[in-house]
Amino acid sequence: MTTTPTAPFNRLLLTGAAGGLGKVLRETLRPYANVIRLSDIADIAPAIDDREEVVICDLSDKHAVHQLVEGVDAILHFGGVSVERPFEEILGANICGVFHIYEAARRHGVKRVIFASSNHVIGFYKQDEVIDARSPRRPDSYYGLSKSYGEDMASFYFDRYGIETVSIRIGSSFPEPQNRRMMSTWLSFGDLTQLIERALSAPNVGHTVVYGASDNKNVWWDNRYATSLGYQPQDSSEVFREKVEAQPMPAADDPAMVYQGGAFVASGPFGD
Ligand code: NAI
Ligand code: 15L
């Protein structure tokens, strides 16, 4: 097997590996482990070499998740429903899913999890408010509620079993900010990778909650707890300002212009 002798981890598990961020992290996290186990419910491109393992797994299947976690040193939990959906869809993938991940971590002795939380945990704050990661949560959706539950799950498994987690409340991680709101919430892929590296390697994190944002100009989040991990973002949404501001200006009372969570605050109800 071709190994990376200096890799800090032998085997990392990445859930959500077929998703937008999973495909990016599959490449950028290679230096940090001898082997990355890539998992998703959807099809994943085959392993490119013996430093990748591909496992199809539904996070709502407890037994399958227990098998998935065997033999890994740390977990990057990025799998699940990533937008607002009816509660029943969120329940299996995100709520049962995060429980299955932590319970499997406990049984297999995994000591560190990186949880892909979301800004939608605090989405009902307004864009003129500045908050930090310890401000009371204000979920804006069933999706945001599921991430809030995931953060509580992380807190419980640290207090009860000593499993450490960094919950990253990712803002908007795409190649470029797509609208005015994302000028504040944008997280470049490079900065996401650096933040994950810090979250994996910083000592004694307990359960630390941080925001996943680049070094943007107009920010709503005091990200001091990420700074404490050693995170130093290298990118800024500012370079996209002209392109973004060429878009039509939404109405002043459009949720996308008012709330930190943008349009998520107005999604639903479902099934009426
Ligand atoms: P994505 O939707 O592209 O990827 C999520 C992946 O999870 C998909 O490949 C999907 O097949 C998989 N998945 C869904 N249900 C599953 C199940 N029951 N079992 C196993 N896998 C399942 O989302 P993206 O953008 O890659 O985000 C990754 C993670 O980061 C998600 O947890 C999302 O909530 C979180 N996040 C992403 C943000 C972003 O800006 N991209 C912002 C905030 C949070
Ligand atoms: C999220 O949590 C979503 O997963 C992502 O698709 C974006 O909508 C992002 O938040 C955002 O708020 O821009």
Image (cartoon, rainbow, N blue to C red):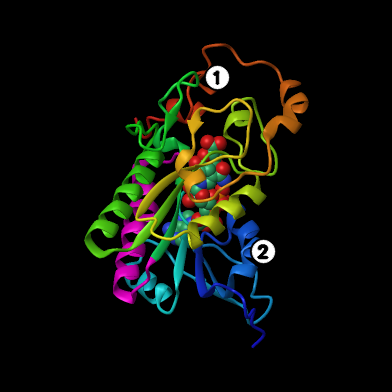
Q: Main secondary structure of the magenta part?
A: helix
Within 10 Å of the Cα at label 1, are there few (<14), some (14-19), or many (20+) other Cα atoms? some
| Residue 82 visible in image | no
256 up-or-down from 45: above or below: above
Can residue 71 be found in the magenta stretch? Answer: no
How many labels were placed on the picture? Answer: 2
- The residue shown at (56%, 62%) is 17
- The residue shown at (29%, 48%) is 152
- Give amino acid for label 1: Met
Front-most of residues 35 and 39: 35
Task: Write the start and end of the magenta stretch as one range.
Answer: 84-111
Ligand 1 closer than 8 Å to the CB at disc 2? Answer: no
Residue 27's disc number: 2
Front-most of residues 235 and 14: 235
SS type, badge 2: helix
Residue found at the far left of this picture: 160
Q: Where is residue 7 drawn, in percent x and y?
A: 59, 74
Can residue 106 be found in the magenta stretch? Answer: yes
239 up-or-down from 79: above or below: above
Q: Quarter of the image for the C terminus: give it.
A: top left
Q: Where is residue 265 drawn, in percent x and y?
A: 43, 27
Q: Where is residue 264 drawn, in percent x and y?
A: 47, 31
**Alpha carbon separation for disc pair 2 and 1:** 34 Å
- The residue shown at (64%, 28%) is 217
Q: Quarter of the image for the N terminus: give it.
A: bottom right
Query: Which residue is tagged 1?
Result: 257
Ligand 2 closer than 8 Å to the CB at disc 1? Answer: no
Q: In the figure, is residue 176 to the left or right of 80?
A: right
